[in-house]
Image: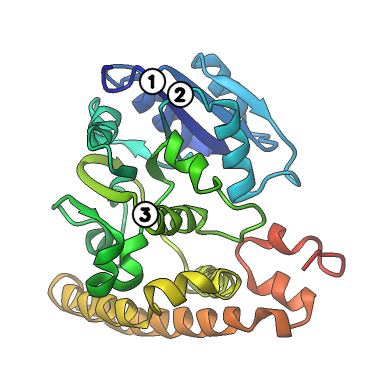
Amino acid sequence: MRATDQTAVIIPTLNGGSVWQHCLGALRQQLPQPAHVIVVDSGSTDGTDVAAQSAGFELLRISKREFDHGGTRQMAAARLKDFDVLVYLTQDAVLADANALKQLVAAFADPKVGTAYGRQLPRQEADPIEAHARIFNYPPQSNIRTLADKTMLGIKAAFTSNSFAAYRTEALMAVGGFPEKLILSEDMVVAARMLQAGWSVAYVAEAQVYHSHGYTIAQEFKRYFDIGVMHQDQAWVLQEFGKPEGEGGRFVRSELAYLKKQAPFLLPAAFVRTLAKYAGYKLGQHALSLPLPLRHKLSMHRSYWGKAGEGNK
């Protein structure tokens, strides 16, 4: 089998904007082309859905209310279960070169690899804080991790990202697929389950995408609030792999050293940002003790809670 002969690509979308055109263009330039591409659109009003059809990709429309990070991805996986490998992209991830998909899928030549993810490069307009986050989490060296690596790496052993990740369909289905009704990090939950089941997680630094976010401090708070919610909801992940504080401390030290060299004027902003992340995370861990309307306001993924006052949580 050639690298992408039995590979399908799945991309959830909602108003992808101008970067979506770059995502589509880069996908169309892949050599060889994936066997199938499905775009799951949850109500775009900016032509994102039309652009996907014009590119020749299958379009599946769902309502915004139907969208669920894990459930929507699993629904698409079930439709494409006959493909050997499923690659997931986000609408703002732009493949860096024509070999990106091929490089990522090549990881499955190792029969023990259940999932693989690529290297995310900061977008051209990224500021130093945004760029460092990608440099820290996506180094230039590839690696393959097993459950035994949790001793050294802790929760980082299960790290992955559905912005550019591939799954052996057999392994994905064997661990129950993506969990539904999860606020975020459905990718990490699957990776953790795969490690528990004896599969390996591959990081393929040669497979690259441009993808980063210029979050405001308020957005960072909300994002980490949601991470806290997820870690409380999926407490078994922390019990199996350890708490994230150690990795968080390592990130902060790395960021400070990087900014001292690259942009010392951003050190005060980085300090405030770190406090916002920590406060958001800790508050998120106790989200269920907060009134539902307040959870709704503090969360980046508000749809998880339903409309304020009538959510299902």
- Residue type of the residue flagged with mark 2: Phe
Query: Disc 1 vs disc 3: Cβ atoms closer than 8 Å?
Result: no
At x 72% / y 70%, what residue is drawn? 296
Quarter of the image for residue 269 reads bottom left
The CA distance from mark 1 to mark 2 is: 5 Å
Q: Nearer the viewer, residue 27 or 144?
A: 144
- Name the secondary structure under disc 1: loop
Colour approach in the figure: rainbow
At x 40% / y 51%, what residue is drawn? 161
Quarter of the image for residue 299 reads bottom right
The crowding category of the residue bearing disc 2, from other C-alpha atoms within 10 Å (few below 14, some 14 to 19, many at least 20), is some
Image position of 309 (left or right of 234): right
Q: Quadrant of the N terminus?
A: top left
At x 31% / y 56%, what residue is drawn? 126
The CA distance from mark 1 to mark 3 is: 22 Å
- Residue type of the residue flagged with mark 1: Gln
* Residue behind mark 3: 160
Image position of 46 (left or right of 22): right
Q: Tag 2 or tag 3, which sits nearer the N-term?
A: 2
Residue placed farthest to the front in the image? 198
Q: Quadrant of the C terminus?
A: bottom right
* Residue 181, horizontal then vertical, whole percent: 67, 56
* Residue 57, horizontal then vertical, whole percent: 52, 18
* Residue 10, horizontal then vertical, whole percent: 50, 32
- Name the secondary structure under disc 2: loop
Q: Nearer the viewer, mark 1 or mark 3?
A: 1
* Residue behind mark 1: 6
* Residue behind mark 2: 83
Image position of 296 (left or right of 307): left
Q: Tag 2 or tag 1, which sits nearer the N-term?
A: 1
Image position of 197 (left or right of 54): left
Query: Disc 1 vs disc 2: Cβ atoms closer than 8 Å?
Result: yes
